[in-house]
Image (cartoon, grey):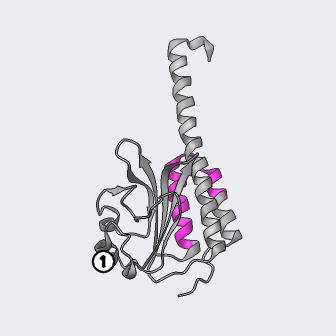
């Protein structure tokens, strides 16, 4: 099936506004995943963050996928959706013709026919991934891919902001505990 432009400027603006209005990463992830599924008309979305200790992708948010699929097993950065460089988007137009999946039988059982996987990078380091799943073969347009790549840059900046904000709050709490008059 040729793309019918599942994402455009108006949808992108709505999703990015949600990213910037979020108060914490979990809420942001859930809202973005819900918006992507509803506005793009896809089967499901997962937003992952990388666990630095295990190099596994851990789910920040999911929408539209069964618990059985979501809990299918550990998803390793270097094994999941195999590509020479995990820094580039991976588009699997038809999962039945691909050998890149870590869990191909689970994707088939879930009814997933195409997957778009985009890394969430921050300063050359993968900190997460955005995965979009469709129940039909899907050929994504160059403009759709551009919007999604921009979205992952925004997600990366937001995740960094939330991480820095947590560090600042911890520092303030510690200083308040040590020297209450300072704050």
Q: Is residue 35 above or below residue 159?
A: below
| Closer-to-camera residue (93/29) | 93
Q: Secondary structure at mark 1?
A: helix
Report which quarter residue 164 is drawn in: top right
Give residue 50's position: percent from left, percent from top: 43, 49
Residue sticking out furthest to the bottom: 1
Find residue 104 and report its horizontal and vertical position in percent.
32, 73
Q: Residue at x 60, y 11 (%)?
A: 181
**Residue 121's x, y, as percent?**
55, 51
**Image coords of residue 52 (percent x, y):** 41, 43
- Number of marks drawn: 1
Report the magenta residues as a range: 17-38
Vertically, is 148 above or below 161?
below
Q: What residue is drawn where x is 64% and y is 51%?
A: 21
Image check: 165 left or right of 95? right
* Residue in the foreground of this view, choosing between 77 and 176: 77
Q: Residue at x 39, y 52 (%)?
A: 58
Q: Quadrant of the C terminus?
A: top right
Circle 1 packing at 10 Å, graded few (<14), some (14-19), many (20+), is: few
Q: Nearer the viewer, residue 124 or 72?
A: 124
Q: Of helix, strand and loop, which mostly describes the magenta segment?
A: helix
- Identify the residue at image location x=54%, y=77%: 41
Residue most toward the front?
A: 84
Residue under label 1: 109
Quarter assignment of residue 135: bottom left
- Residue 34 falls within the magenta-colored stretch: yes
Q: Viewed as shown, does residue 101 lie left or right of 5? A: left
Is residue 149 a member of the stretch shown in magenta?
A: no
Residue 97 drawn above or below residue 154: below
């Amino acid at each position: 099936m040729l793309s019918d432009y599942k994402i455009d400027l108006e949808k992108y603006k709505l999703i990015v506004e949600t990213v910037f209005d979020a108060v914490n990463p979990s809420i942001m992830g859930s809202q973005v995943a819900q918006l992507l599924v509803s506005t793009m008309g896809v089967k499901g979305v997962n937003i992952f963050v990388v666990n630095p200790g295990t190099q596994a992708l851990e789910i920040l948010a999911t929408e539209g996928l069964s618990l059985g699929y979501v809990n299918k097993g550990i998803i390793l950065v270097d094994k999941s959706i195999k590509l020479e460089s995990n820094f580039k988007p991976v588009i699997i137009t038809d999962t039945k013709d691909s050998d890149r999946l870590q869990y191909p039988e689970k994707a088939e059982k879930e009814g997933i026919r195409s997957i778009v996987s985009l890394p969430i990078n921050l300063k050359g380091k993968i900190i997460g991934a955005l995965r979009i799943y469709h129940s039909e073969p899907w050929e994504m347009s160059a403009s759709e891919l551009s919007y999604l790549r921009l979205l992952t840059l925004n997600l990366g900046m937001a995740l960094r902001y939330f991480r820095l904000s947590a560090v600042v709050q911890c520092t303030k709490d510690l200083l308040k505990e040590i020297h209450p008059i300072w704050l």
